[in-house]
Amino acid sequence: MKRPDWFFNYYCSAACYAAADDLTAARRNVAQAKTFGPYPMQALRVGHRFADRKLLVQFVRHLTAAGGME
């Protein structure tokens, strides 16, 4: 990972692993991400705008499956 100090990389990886049905890796990435603090839905909406609402819904669904949304 190029930026191990940036929490969003771990959440993004977690969503990708969840989408690939690797929940063990997804949860491991969420655990690492949570060491930086919580990631509430409001932070996602403000800090990471998705141009396509369907992609946001997909991202949230996978991140929720990984245990990453509060």
Image (cartoon, rainbow, N blue to C red):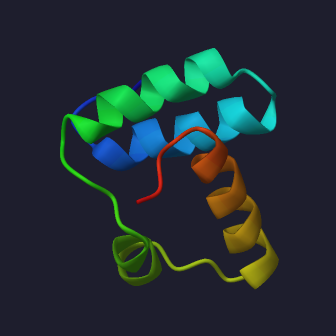
Quarter holding the N terminus? Answer: top left
Residue shown at 35% from the left, 66% from the top:
40
Viewer-side residue, 3 vs 32: 32
Residue shown at 33% from the left, 58% from the top:
39
Image location (x, y in percent) of residue 42: 37, 79
* The image quarter in which residue 58 lies: bottom right
Residue 3 appears in the figure: no
Q: Relative to 31, is 56 above or below? A: below
Image location (x, y in percent) of residue 31: 36, 28
Quarter holding the C terminus? Answer: bottom left
Viewer-side residue, 58 vs 69: 69
Image location (x, y in percent) of residue 5: 21, 35
Left or right of 37 on screen, residue 24: right
Image location (x, y in percent) of residue 27: 51, 27
Residue shown at 72% from the left, 21% from the top:
22
Q: How many marks?
A: 0
Q: Relative to 43, is 24 above or below? A: above
Residue 61 appears in the figure: yes
Left or right of 64 on screen, residue 6: left
Residue shown at 55% from the left, 35% from the top:
13
